């Protein structure tokens, strides 16, 4: 369920904070309904790129278009409308303390003018989908890492976003939870055509999940393409070779040096 | 200069959002806000009562015990309560409660907001189209104003009674007579002074604390730096507000 119109277009986007350049002129396009895996070494700018894509941060230079809308040109009110189409899962969940699992899921629906029954229905649906029903009245501090991530995912999905952005949400999860997460994302894309961007460190997971891979190096885009092409280029490109050296690669794919 | 303009803009935003918060609360359209409001009221107005009471009684006793040493020579014990009551109501009550609020509520708010920024909860709220100022700061802002005024009045009353009790013990003048003198001496403008000082201190302390928390640096020492700045700036506010009022009125 993909369409020709790009969901995300970055043109020479630059992001800076506290005098540091985090994203340094990235040009990238992602079609609607595609899954993009963003990877790279620690501090390469993955989270900063995701912040640009979620409109939390505006580029210092260059431009970003989401679903055909220039995020700078539409102004803050336009960005607020656009954010209603975006779901973000932060690395540590960013659940609101003092609010139960179900209340955390209710928060993003609060300003959408939905009927109370519709809100309850959506919350029940995603509590069931993500196996959170028995935890609905628990506080974030009472949840394990896996449950926090699932609640954060449920909070992002309860609005039915066109674009889902996940920042290293599988880090620290067991394999069962990662596989369940993978199945969920595939189903989302298949059933709702959701465009998904994931920051991922795990190469095996990247291969399982992503239609396309973006490799960042010091705030620049070192590679964008499918995983097969990444395998081919890794040996020839010195930057990719430095990021994914033989030890990293064979640890991710122990059965064969080239997956 | 830029940060002063930024701060003033933040002050206006905070006042506006707090006003809107009160409107939605009265209209019954703010379930989460109502819960936050009552929770903060318990935390900021009810829980501090024992400590504020100990402060008040201690200060009343300290002032009266020190003053009596000088004034007994002049045989002015009965007038002493007037001076002590004026000092406590007009100056000490708002200043002591202000310091207490700055060190407790202001610091707690700055650290809470700073932590929310670092844990990306503020970003999450922004993405959900929920204004952090109205959602997090406004309930604390409103409760803080109520609590600082209520605690200042409570402090003033308790400290004057404590001072009267000490003077009765010292000079054998009945405490009811001493409190009668206080009632005749204090005017509504003295009580109003106590309330207005409390309100000004409360507004500035909360806004400075919230501003510091929300503009935290993302490096490792950010939170401890926010805590230090907030305590120092809040205490400075309490003293400067006191000074400004004292010079003017």
Image (tube, coloured by chain):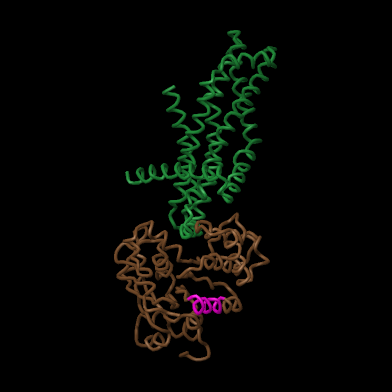
Which shade is chain B? green
Q: Which residues are magenta?
A: A181-192
In this orientation, which residue lies closer to the viewer: B37 or B177? Answer: B37
| Residue A126 occupies quadrant | bottom right
Q: Is residue B175 left or right of residue A58?
A: right
Q: Spot the residue most to the top.
A: B75
Residue B13 vs B99, above or below: the answer is below
Residue B126 % position (x, y): 46, 57
Dominant SS of magenta comes to: helix
Residue B44 % position (x, y): 59, 41
Q: Is residue A197 visible?
A: yes
Q: Is residue B212 left or right of residue B187?
A: left
Residue B167 vs A113, above or below: the answer is above
Tell me which residue sits at (62%, 31%) in the image.
B55
A185 within the magenta span = yes
Tell me which residue sits at (44%, 62%) in the image.
A83
Tell me which residue sits at (53%, 37%) in the image.
B145
Which shade is chain A? brown
Please tell me how many numbered marks the rendered image carries: 0
Residue B209 vs B248, above or below: the answer is below
In this orientation, which residue lies closer to the viewer: B181 or B87? Answer: B181
Residue B77 % position (x, y): 62, 12
A245 within the magenta span = no
């Amino acid at each position: 369920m993909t369409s020709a119109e790009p969901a995300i277009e970055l043109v020479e986007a630059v992001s800076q904070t506290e005098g540091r350049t985090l994203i340094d002129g990235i040009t990238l396009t992602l079609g609607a309904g595609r899954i993009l895996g963003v990877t790279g070494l620690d501090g390469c700018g993955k989270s900063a790129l995701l912040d640009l894509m979620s409109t939390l941060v505006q580029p210092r230079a260059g431009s970003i278009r989401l679903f055909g809308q220039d995020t700078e040109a539409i102004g803050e009110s336009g960005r607020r409308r656009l954010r209603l189409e975006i779901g973000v899962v932060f690395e540590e969940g960013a659940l609101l303390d003092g609010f139960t699992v179900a209340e955390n899921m209710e928060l993003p629906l609060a300003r959408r003018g939905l009927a109370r029954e519709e809100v309850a229905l959506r919350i029940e649906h995603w509590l069931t989908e993500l196996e959170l029903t028995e935890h609905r009245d628990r506080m974030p501090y009472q949840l394990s890492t896996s449950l926090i991530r699932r609640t954060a995912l449920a909070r992002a999905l309860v609005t039915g976003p066109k674009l889902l952005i996940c920042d290293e949400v599988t880090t620290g999860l067991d394999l069962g939870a990662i596989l369940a997460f993978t199945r969920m994302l595939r189903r989302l894309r298949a059933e709702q055509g959701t465009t998904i961007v994931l920051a991922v460190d795990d190469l095996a997971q990247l291969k399982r999940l992503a239609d396309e891979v973006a490799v960042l190096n010091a705030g620049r885009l070192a590679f964008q393409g499918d995983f097969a092409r990444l395998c081919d280029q890794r040996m020839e490109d010195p930057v990719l070779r430095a990021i994914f050296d033989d030890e990293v690669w064979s640890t991710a794919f122990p059965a064969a040096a080239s997956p | 200069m830029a940060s002063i303009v930024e701060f003033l803009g933040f002050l206006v935003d905070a006042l506006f959002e707090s006003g809107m918060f009160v409107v939605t609360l009265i209209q019954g359209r703010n379930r989460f806000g109502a819960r936050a409001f009552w929770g903060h009221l318990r935390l900021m107005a009810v829980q501090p009562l024992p400590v504020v009471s100990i402060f008040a009684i201690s200060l009343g006793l300290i002032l009266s015990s020190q003053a009596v040493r000088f004034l007994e020579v002049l045989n002015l014990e009965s007038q002493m309560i007037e001076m002590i009551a004026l000092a406590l109501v007009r100056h000490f009550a708002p200043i002591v409660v202000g310091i207490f609020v700055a060190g407790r509520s202001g610091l707690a708010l700055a650290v809470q907001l700073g932590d929310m920024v670092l844990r990306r909860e503020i970003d999450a709220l922004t993405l959900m189209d929920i204004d952090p100022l109205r959602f997090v700061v406004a309930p604390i802002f409103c409760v803080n104003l109520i609590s600082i005024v209520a605690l200042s009045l409570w402090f003033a009353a308790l400290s004057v009674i404590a001072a009267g009790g000490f003077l009765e013990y010292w000079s054998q003048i009945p405490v009811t007579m001493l409190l009668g003198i206080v009632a005749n001496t204090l005017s509504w403008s003295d009580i109003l002074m106590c309330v207005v000082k409390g309100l000004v201190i409360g507004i500035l302390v909360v806004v400075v604390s919230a501003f510091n928390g929300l503009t935290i640096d993302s490096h490792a020492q950010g939170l401890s730096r926010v805590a230090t700045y907030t305590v120092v700036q809040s205490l400075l506010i309490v003293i400067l507000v006191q000074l400004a009022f004292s010079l003017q009125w």
